């Protein structure tokens, strides 16, 4: 009876064999938990891969449907030539723009004559 009481730690100190059993049980429990987590993760990965394949198939079907729809629209386009008549033209305004320049002839440092166009009024930059 004293060995059982000593193993359970009733008199102050646990037996080494009980401590070893406790450690082994804890390691086995952790190992089982890790294996269960791995199996659960693998099942989740398989489910996600199946979802991805399903979505790829759906996307391909949608792309084919859109391609077919727009191909039909392109086939339905017809070209119509419209020539304007004199009565279709309505002139509302005629304008003339002019930017005056000064033509300046000068002699450069080498003695050659040069002609440049210089704006007659300052040009404002936008």
Image: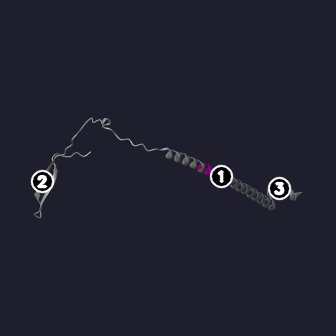
SS assignment at label 2: strand
Residue 58 counted in the magenta span? yes
Q: Nearer the viewer, residue 33 or 19?
A: 33
Q: Is residue 73 left or right of residue 50?
A: left
Q: Who comes first in sequence, dot 1 or dot 3? A: 3
At 89% from the left edge and 57% from the top edge, which residue is drawn? 1
Residue marked by disc 1: 48
At 60% from the left edge and 49% from the top edge, which residue is drawn? 61
Relative height, residue 73 to residue 112 (above, below): above
Residue marked by disc 3: 8
Q: Position of residue 75 (x, y in %)?
A: 50, 46
Residues at discs 1 and 2 in contact (Cβ within 8 Å) = no
Residues at discs 2 and 3 in contact (Cβ within 8 Å) = no
- Which one is in front in this view, the residue at disc 1 or the one at disc 2? 2
Residue marked by disc 2: 104
Relative height, residue 3 to residue 62 (above, below): below
Query: What stretch of residues is rendered in magenta?
Result: 44-59
């Amino acid at each position: 009876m004293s060995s059982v009481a000593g193993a359970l730690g009733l008199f102050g100190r646990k037996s080494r064999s009980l401590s070893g059993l406790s450690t082994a049980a804890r390691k086995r429990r952790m190992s089982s938990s890790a294996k269960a987590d791995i199996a659960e993760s693998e099942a989740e990965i398989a489910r996600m891969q199946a979802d991805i394949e399903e979505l790829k198939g759906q996307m391909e079907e949608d792309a084919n449907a859109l391609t077919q729809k727009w191909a039909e629209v392109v086939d339905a386009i017809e070209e119509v030539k419209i020539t304007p008549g004199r009565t279709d033209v309505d002139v509302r305004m005629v304008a003339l723009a002019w930017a005056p320049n000064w033509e300046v002839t000068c002699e450069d440092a080498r003695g050659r004559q040069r002609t440049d166009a210089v704006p007659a009024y300052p040009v404002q930059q936008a």
